[in-house]
Image (cartoon, rainbow, N blue to C red):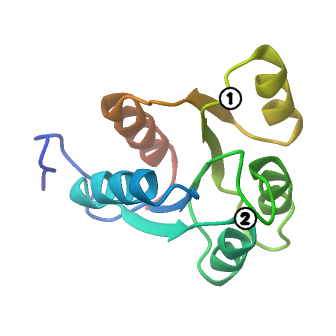
């Protein structure tokens, strides 16, 4: 099986990706990209909604805007990192904040990768393919 980009997919394992983004157009565009490539995308417009979604349907990957209302991306990452009984998702900051201090705060919150908007779709899709290859079906 192949995606629209012609790259092979693992039909035994579809990644569930949580998109935590308060800008509706950005969230929709990201979710559409993910779904076109065969990923299951869940969209939350604030940190509290994202945490609730993660509790009911644990994601494999969480793409976190850092400036979320209700609970910012840093705190959300800390909460996702500490959920009991669940495998921790790959945490990726997808943010307009790219200063060294922002990156250090991401690392301190347990965020695995820090991407600065606008992100290149190929960069994100490559990251997801590499991550999917490391987990069991």
- Mark 1 sits on what residue? 97
Q: Is residue 130 left or right of residue 60?
A: left
The residue tagged with tag 1: helix, strand or loop? loop
Relative to 97, say whether 133 is above or below. below
Residue 84's image quarter?
bottom right
Q: Earlier in the sequence, mark 2 or mark 1?
A: 2
Q: Position of residue 47 (x, y in %)?
A: 72, 64
In this view, which residue lies farthest toward the top?
100
Image quadrant occupied by the C terminus: bottom left
Task: Count how many numbered circles sit on residues in the image.
Answer: 2
Q: Position of residue 119 (x, y in %)?
A: 44, 30
Relative to 27, say whether 91 is above or below. above
Q: Residue at coordinates 13% horizontally, 50% vertically from top-left?
A: 2
- Residue 10 — which label? none
Q: Is residue 25 left or right of residue 4?
A: right
Q: Position of residue 109 (x, y in %)?
A: 86, 42
- Closer to the camera in the image, 42 or 1: 42
Q: Position of residue 106 (x, y in %)?
A: 79, 34
Q: How crowded is the residue under tag 2: few (<14 C-alpha within 10 Å), some, or many (20+)?
A: many
**Label 2 – label 1 distance at C-alpha:** 17 Å
Q: Residue at coordinates 50% horizontally, 67% vertically from top-left?
A: 43
Image quadrant occupied by the N terminus: bottom left
- Closer to the camera in the image, 49 or 114: 49
Q: Residue at coordinates 49% horizontally, 42% vertically from top-left?
A: 131
Q: Residue at coordinates 29% horizontally, 58% vertically from top-left?
A: 32
Residue 96's image quarter?
top right
- Residue 47 — which label? 2
- Closer to the camera in the image, 109 or 45: 45
Q: Is residue 112 left or right of residue 30?
A: right
Q: How crowded is the residue under tag 1: few (<14 C-alpha within 10 Å), some, or many (20+)?
A: some
The residue tagged with tag 2: helix, strand or loop? helix
């Amino acid at each position: 099986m192949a995606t629209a980009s012609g790259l092979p997919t693992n039909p035994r394992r579809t990644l569930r990706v949580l998109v935590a983004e308060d800008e509706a157009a950005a969230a929709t565009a990201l979710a559409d990209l993910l779904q076109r490539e065969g990923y299951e995308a869940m969209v939350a417009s604030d940190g509290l909604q994202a945490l609730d979604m993660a509790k009911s349907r644990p994601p494999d990957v969480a793409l976190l805007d850092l400036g979320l209302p209700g609970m910012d991306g840093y705190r959300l990452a800390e909460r996702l990192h500490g959920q009991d009984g669940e495998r921790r998702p790959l945490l990726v900051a997808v943010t307009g904040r790219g200063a060294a201090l922002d990156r250090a705060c991401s690392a301190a919150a347990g965020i695995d990768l820090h991407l600065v908007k606008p992100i290149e779709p190929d960069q994100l899709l490559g990251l997801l393919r590499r991550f999917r290859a490391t987990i069991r079906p």
